[in-house]
Amino acid sequence: MSRERVAMQKVKELFRLRFELKLSIRKIAKCLDISTGDVSDYLKRASKSDLSWEDIKNIPHGDLSNLLFPNDSDSNKYPC
């Protein structure tokens, strides 16, 4: 069974908490009420895509989803 994707608004907050506030994966997960696995997964996806916080904070949600999930034809189903 596949997991439901985290809303892009929450994903952007995840990156802000990590890169601006330097919070740990565990603290980010607790703040956003998501799993530590989800936090790690999004951080790895951003790293793999060579996305910095400066890039991420200026990218529209739909475009960010496409960058984080490049091989997922359903990425446009998650616009928020």
Image: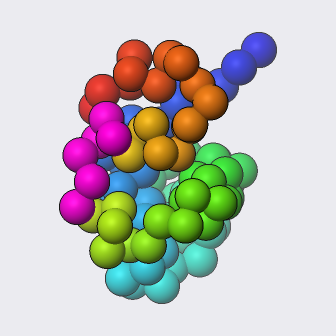
Image spot of residue 45 (x, y percent): 62, 54
- Residue positioned most to the right: 1
Q: How many marks?
A: 0
Viewer-nearest residue: 26 or 56:
56
One can see residue 7 in this view: yes
Image spot of residue 50 (x, y percent): 55, 67
The answer to which image quadrant residue 54 occupies is: bottom left
Boundaries of the magenta span? 58-63
Question: Where's the N terminus, which quadrant?
Answer: top right
Q: Is residue 62 above or below residue 67?
A: above
Q: Is residue 61 left or right of residue 4?
A: left
Q: Residue at x 43, y 79 (%)?
A: 19
One can see residue 16 in this view: no
Q: Is residue 3 above or below residue 62?
A: above
Q: Residue at x 48, y 85 (%)?
A: 22
Image spot of residue 21 (x, y percent): 39, 83
- The reply to whether the magenta stretch includes residue 11 is no
Viewer-nearest residue: 39 or 57:
57
Image spot of residue 62 (x, y percent): 31, 35
